[in-house]
Amino acid sequence: IIGTSLAVYPAASFVSYFNGGKIALVNKSKTDFDKRADIVIYDDIVNVIEKLENWTQDIVFSFFFLIYKFAKFVVKWLKNMCVYVHIV
């Protein structure tokens, strides 16, 4: 639940109707429902979304970089392991 004080309805009822596994509240200040959340972040939503975006971009880049390095290693290893047979 993002960017609501959960003090007015219908937003205040969101926590009561939630049937999922985990709930996160992102708000600039405390709410009456903070103790029901699995994670509470006190910050401006724009800052939180920007940080999440940068974090996920870093993870995706790192993941593909590792795949690239592993593929180079495998290709080099295969080249060294292959025995070339030349039939005359």
Image: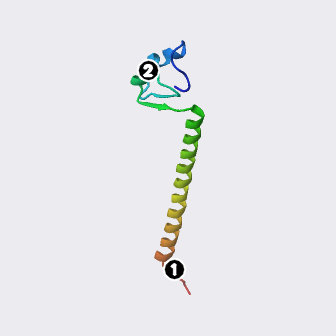
Q: Amino acid at mark 2?
A: Phe
Identity of the residue drawn at 52% across and 49% down = 59
Any mark on residue 33, and which?
A: 2
Q: Dot 1 surroundings within 10 Å: few (below 14), some, or many (20 or more)? A: few
Q: Residue at x 55, y 36 (%)?
A: 48
The residue that appears at 43% across and 20% down in the rendered structure is 33
Q: Position of residue 70 (x, y in %)?
A: 50, 63
Residue 54 lies, in percent from the top left, at 57, 45
* Residue 34 picture quarter: top left
> Disc 1 and disc 2: Cα gap in Å?
69 Å
Q: Secondary structure at mark 2?
A: loop
Q: Amino acid at mark 1?
A: Tyr
Q: What SS does tag 1 mark?
A: loop
- Above-or-below relation of 15 to 45: above
Q: Is residue 26 left or right of residue 46?
A: left
Where's residue 3, x and y in %?
A: 56, 25
User: Which labelled disc corresponds to residue 84?
Assistant: 1
Residue that sits furthest to the front in the current view: 29
Toward the viewer: 17 or 34?
Answer: 34
Q: Nearer the viewer, residue 62 or 7?
A: 7
Disc assigned to residue 39: none
| Vertical order, 55 against 74 (above or below) | above
Image location of residue 62, percent across then percent down: 53, 55
Horizontal side of 35 relative to 41 (left or right) equals: left
Q: Nearer the viewer, mark 1 or mark 2?
A: 2
Residue drawn at the location 54% of the way across and 45% of the way down: 56
Name the one closer to the observer, 12 or 84.
Answer: 12
Compared with 19, 87 (above or below) is below
